[in-house]
Structures are given as structure tokens and as C-alpha cells.
Image (tube, rainbow, N blue to C red):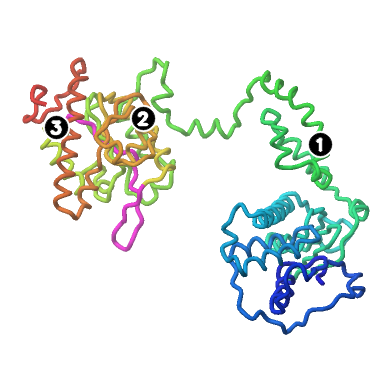
């Protein structure tokens, strides 16, 4: 004999006794009764001290599925669970047989309970009781299965600081911010007598956020079936919103676009114009010196607060070859010049071996301030994030627009991402040429700092050679495109267009 709201633990206690007495499924009946009928039960009770002769170990999946299936509304659910448990004594691998009818039914019962529990969590609406001095919230739901205690535990964790009551036809749950108390259910008539003035505001809010252009009625009803609508305040306005959706969509398309808010205009005024802003504008581009002066006062992201100064690019305004690194390092931040620290010295050496004259190239960074974390007397390097790259993008666009290089060399993943938006691994595109956001050719290679971090000497030598080869490839591309380009010579003396 089990109570109507009995769960898995109540059934398991009785099932253990039945197994101890070796009672087969066809000789025992689990009867589910409500509270008023318990004393009318005249069957033969099971002795509480009976235990199985041999311990029964069941798969974890059975316990997990049976815990949910025990909350199903089917009256014979406990009888079915005992039959399946009896079979597991002789068929320990039964739960692995996906085609077995009992296993399939167990899964169906459990899924139905979990689906009902999900809907209850999604569609319960608490309303405030206006007739009580203490702030108290109440809600109503009609679950298909015996899930109220399980759902109440969820709401007690979700709304710990609220005092609330959850009513259903079968059971009610009450939370006083300390403990859960369960009582009898209430009828729908009693619930309808509770009014909430805030529901009108909720309907207005729902009607205003409703987007008629994205209406998909079938998808909406699949997620929120009509049987739940009577418990949702917004359901009262859904039919009218659906009916008028087509007309509202046409009106939205025909309406003129709204002007951006004033806040947007103020932000755009503070933003330095980018190279793309000047498309079709006959006004000449500002000189690099003017842009450098503007960038010195940049406060678009918090990086300036821990940096010494803005480190702008350097090189001739008509350079055919541009190198873009990640950001300034500690020594670059102090000197105010890009690539002058240990990585910069290695960069100069590789340029020399590639036969490239640095003074004929334009060298800059994707991010103009040194992102670091102070640790005592040292400042640890930190990789710039998307926010910092976006804040510095217009400065980089200015440099590219003024210099108008024939090829850009991206030194590392951050520079590559800033120039092209590429988010994949660097190794997959290294040595290749990608079209940048501005349409220019971007040759991909590693940052010199990467070579300094390599502990394997053989690999370091190999990577250095590969980087020099990438530089020579960029030189060759720039030389081909440089025939009609009035720019300083790129060659340092050992490499000429003939022998590249």
C-alpha cells in the first residue's frame, strides 16, 4: 500500500521487503490510495524486517529513470517498476537492451515526467497577494504528473528570499524562506478569485516586446502548448497579436527608419573617423603626424591607465611594406617606439638577413597601449582582448589608409585577427596571404617574441628560417606591386628583385 503522492523512495522500501520474501510480480499488488482511503485498506501488509537473501545491485540508469517514472500519473507505475526490478535479478544487463518493451516503457514514463517538470518550471507565474500585510506571492499550475514536491524544491532554491505558495489541484507547497511545507490542493475556482493588478502591466510589456516579423505560430505552440495558456497572463493578448502580425509587419517595413538616439551621435563625435568613413569623400587624408598627435590622447579603453604613453607606428608615409605586431612591450612603452625591445632586436636581425631595410618599411602595432599587469617592479605582458582591438582599430585604419602599403605582414595571431577578423589557429595559415578587411594583401607569420620563447634550439633555428622566408615572400610581393609605386627602396643590399 502506497500513498497517492508516494515517490521512488517509498516504493523502494516496500520493494526491498517483497524481494526479501521472494514474492514474484504476479503475486503482489502495489495499490496507490489517497489519504482518506488508507484506513480502508484490508490487504495483507508486508513484514518490515524482511530482507533479500542475496543483495541485488541495479544499474545506475534504472535508479535514475525509475526515480522520475515513479512520479508518473499511471496507477500501475509501481507494479511495473517491481516487475522490471524482478527481471533485473536474472537479467543484469537488461537496461542495455534498447528494444526491450519494459525498458522502452520505463524511458517513456521518465521522459514524460521530465517534460512536465520542465513545463512547470517555465510556465509558473507568481503573483503578489494584495490582501496580505506581509509580501507574499502565489502561483497556480496544473501538472500532468506528481511533480509538485520536486518542482517546489527547485522554486525554493530559485526564489529563496521570497515567501510564496504554489497551488495545484493535488497538492500545495508553501515556502517561508526557511522550510518547505506541503498541504492539500485547491480548486481552480479558488485560484481564480485571487487577482493581481500587475498582470495588466505584464500584458502591456509582452505586447510591446512582441515582434510580428519573427512570428512562427507552430514553433510557439510547440514550446508553449495551448493547454498552458489559461495559466499565463500574457495568453490573453496572444490571439490578437497573432491576428494583427501581418499588418504590423507591413507597417514596419513601410515606415521610415528611426533616427539613432542622441547618445549614439555623441559617441560618434568622440570617435576618430576611420579610413572607411572617407570613402567617396574628396577631403585629403590627415598626415600620420596629425593622427599620431590625436592618438596620444586616446582614452577609448582602460589600457592607457597602466601604460606610459601611446606607441604609434613609425616609417615613411609611402612605404610599400607594412609590419603589424600585437602591442607594445615594456621597453616599447618606455621608448615610445614599436619593436625596439628584445623581440624588436630579433626582428631587425631577421629583416637584415632577408635583405629588407627597416627604414623603408612602416612598423606598427594593432593595439597602441601596453596591456600589462603590475607585479612588484615588473609589468607582465597580457594579450589584448577584442575590446582593446576594436578601440584601436580606427588608428590602424588611418595608418593603412595614409601609407597605402602594397603588402601587410601580420606578426602573430592578434595582428592577424585585427587585420582580417580571422579567429582560427595561426599555424593553419602561416606563410599564406589573406585578404584584409581593407582589401590589401596580408601575409601571415609569427611574432618575433614567439621565437624568443622557444626552448628547443633546433626548433628555434627552424622557426627563424621560416620567418625569414616569410619576410622574403612579402618582399617579393611588394616588389612586384611596387613598380609604379613611388616609395623608398625596400632592399638592404643583399637581396635584389632579380635574385628574389
The disc, 2 or 3, on the residue closer to the chain's N-terminal end is: 3
The disc, 1 or 3, on the residue closer to the chain's N-terminal end is: 1
In this view, the mark in front (2 or 1): 1
Q: Is residue 381 magenta?
A: yes
Q: Which mark is residue 397?
A: 2
How packed is label 1: few (under 14 Cα within 10 Å), some, or many (20 or more)? few
Q: Quadrant of the N terminus?
A: bottom right
The residue lying at 69 percent from left, 32 percent from top is 216
Q: Horizontal and vertical percent for residue 478?
A: 20, 24
Give the magenta range. Answer: 360-383
Q: Which residue is mark 3?
A: 356
How packed is label 2: few (under 14 Cα within 10 Å), some, or many (20 or more)? some
Residues marked 2 and 3 touching at CB (< 8 Å): no
Q: At numbered mark 2, what does the secondary structure look like: helix, strand or loop?
A: helix
Q: Which residue is mark 1?
A: 237
Q: CA distance from mark 2 to mark 3?
A: 24 Å
Residues marked 1 and 3 touching at CB (< 8 Å): no
Q: Horizontal and vertical percent for residue 33?
A: 86, 67
Q: CA distance from mark 2 to mark 1?
A: 50 Å
Q: Horizontal and vertical percent for residue 196?
A: 85, 50
The disc, 2 or 1, on the residue closer to the chain's N-terminal end is: 1
The residue lying at 88 percent from left, 70 percent from top is 35
**Side (left or right) of 149 relative to 430:** right
Amino acid at each position: 500500500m502506497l500513498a497517492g503522492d508516494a515517490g521512488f523512495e517509498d516504493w523502494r522500501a516496500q520493494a526491498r521487503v517483497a524481494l526479501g520474501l521472494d514474492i514474484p510480480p504476479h503475486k503482489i499488488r502495489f495499490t496507490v490510495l489517497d489519504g482518506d482511503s488508507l484506513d480502508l485498506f484490508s490487504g495483507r501488509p508486508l513484514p518490515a524486517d524482511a530482507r533479500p537473501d542475496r543483495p541485488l545491485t541495479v544499474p545506475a540508469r534504472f535508479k535514475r529513470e525509475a526515480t522520475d517514472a515513479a512520479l508518473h500519473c499511471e496507477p500501475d507505475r509501481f507494479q511495473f517498476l517491481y516487475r522490471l526490478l524482478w527481471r533485473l535479478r536474472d537479467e543484469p544487463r537488461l537496461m542495455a537492451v534498447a528494444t526491450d518493451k519494459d525498458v522502452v516503457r520505463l524511458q517513456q514514463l521518465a521522459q514524460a515526467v521530465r517534460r512536465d517538470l520542465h513545463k512547470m518550471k517555465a510556465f509558473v507565474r507568481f503573483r503578489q497577494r494584495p490582501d496580505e500585510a506581509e509580501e507574499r506571492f502565489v502561483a497556480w499550475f496544473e501538472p500532468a504528473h506528481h511533480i509538485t514536491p520536486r518542482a517546489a524544491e527547485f522554486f525554493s532554491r530559485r526564489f529563496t528570499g521570497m515567501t510564496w505558495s504554489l497551488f495545484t489541484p493535488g497538492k500545495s507547497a508553501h515556502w517561508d524562506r526557511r522550510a518547505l511545507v506541503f498541504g492539500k490542493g485547491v480548486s481552480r475556482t479558488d485560484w481564480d478569485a485571487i487577482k493581481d493588478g500587475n498582470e495588466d502591466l505584464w500584458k502591456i510589456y509582452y505586447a510591446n516586446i512582441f515582434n510580428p516579423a519573427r512570428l512562427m505560430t507552430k514553433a510557439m505552440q510547440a514550446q508553449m502548448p495551448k493547454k498552458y495558456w489559461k495559466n499565463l497572463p500574457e495568453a490573453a493578448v496572444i490571439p490578437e497579436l497573432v491576428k494583427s502580425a501581418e499588418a504590423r509587419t507591413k507597417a514596419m517595413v513601410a515606415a521610415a527608419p528611426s533616427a539613432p538616439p542622441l547618445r549614439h551621435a555623441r559617441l560618434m563625435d568622440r570617435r576618430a573617423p576611420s579610413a572607411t568613413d572617407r570613402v567617396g569623400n574628396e577631403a585629403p587624408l590627415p598626415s600620420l603626424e596629425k593622427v599620431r598627435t590625436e592618438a596620444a590622447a586616446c582614452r577609448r579603453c582602460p589600457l592607457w591607465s597602466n601604460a606610459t604613453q601611446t606607441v604609434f607606428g613609425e616609417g615613411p608615409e609611402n612605404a610599400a611594406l607594412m609590419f603589424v605586431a600585437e602591442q607594445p612591450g615594456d621597453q616599447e612603452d618606455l621608448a615610445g617606439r614599436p619593436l625596439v625591445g628584445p623581440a624588436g632586436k630579433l626582428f631587425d636581425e631577421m629583416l637584415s638577413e632577408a635583405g629588407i631595410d627597416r627604414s623603408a618599411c612602416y612598423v606598427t602595432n594593432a593595439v597602441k597601449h601596453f596591456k600589462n599587469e603590475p607585479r612588484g617592479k615588473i609589468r607582465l605582458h597580457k594579450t589584448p582582448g577584442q575590446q582593446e582591438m576594436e578601440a584601436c582599430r580606427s588608428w590602424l585604419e588611418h595608418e593603412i589608409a595614409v601609407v597605402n602599403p602594397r603588402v601587410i605582414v601580420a606578426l602573430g595571431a592578434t595582428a592577424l585577427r585585427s587585420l582580417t577578423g580571422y579567429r582560427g589557429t595561426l599555424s593553419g595559415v602561416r606563410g599564406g596571404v589573406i585578404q584584409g578587411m581593407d582589401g590589401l594583401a596580408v601575409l601571415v607569420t609569427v611574432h618575433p617574441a614567439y621565437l624568443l620563447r622557444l626552448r628547443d634550439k633546433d626548433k628555434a633555428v627552424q622557426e627563424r628560417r621560416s620567418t625569414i622566408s616569410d619576410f622574403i615572400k612579402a618582399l617579393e610581393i611588394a616588389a612586384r606591386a611596387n613598380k609604379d609605386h613611388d616609395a623608398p627602396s625596400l632592399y638592404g643590399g643583399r637581396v635584389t628583385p632579380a635574385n628574389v
